[in-house]
Amino acid sequence: MSGTSDAQMVIDDTFAEWGHAATYAPPGGQPGDPITILVDLRDEGARPDDGRPQAGQISLQVRKSEVVAPATRGVFAFDNRTVTIVNRPKLDDEEGLVWTMWAE
């Protein structure tokens, strides 16, 4: 099995275990098909005992296979809340399989 296939399996397992059902709407667009996202309510630089992120920001991750190109001002809806992407999403895993971004 290739490295990318192995990485994809690990990512899929992580999203299956810890993911939240969501939808994504690009800026000015309509929500698409259901997707799964990972949500971290803490600041990336915070320790677990630091509590909630500053200014209400959260970190989100979505698989590139589900949202090919999320954009700044795009909107995710999950768990009865709606958040807007506030930075430029980046692919920062080695295989480029998961988008990471801030939202509020």
Image: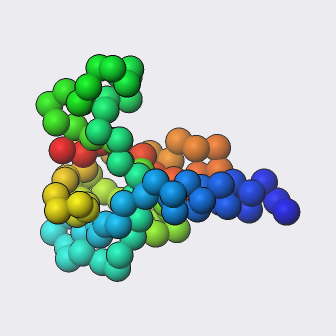
Furthest-right residue in view?
1
**What is the x, y in percent for residue 64?**
50, 62
Furthest-bottom residue in view?
33
Q: Quadrant of residue 30?
A: bottom left
**What is the x, y in percent for residue 98?**
51, 53
Relative vertical location of residue 30 with respect to residue 69 in this rendering, above or below: below
- Relative depth, front residue between 35 and 16: 16
**What is the x, y in percent for residue 90?**
44, 45
Q: Which residue corresponds to the image point at 30% horizontal and 78% vertical from the top-left?
A: 32
Is residue 26 visible to the viewer in this orientation of the structure? no
Left or right: residue 22 versus residue 98 is left
- Relative depth, front residue between 9 and 66: 9
Quarter that holds the C terminus: top left
Colouring rule applied to residues? rainbow
Relative vertical location of residue 45 with respect to residue 17 in this rendering, above or below: above
Q: Which residue corresponds to the image point at 67% horizontal and 61% vertical from the top-left?
A: 9
Left or right: residue 33 versus residue 10 is left
Relative vertical location of residue 47 with respect to residue 95 in this rendering, above or below: above
Q: Which residue corresponds to the image point at 65% horizontal and 60% vertical from the top-left?
A: 8
Is residue 78 visible to the viewer in this orientation of the structure? yes
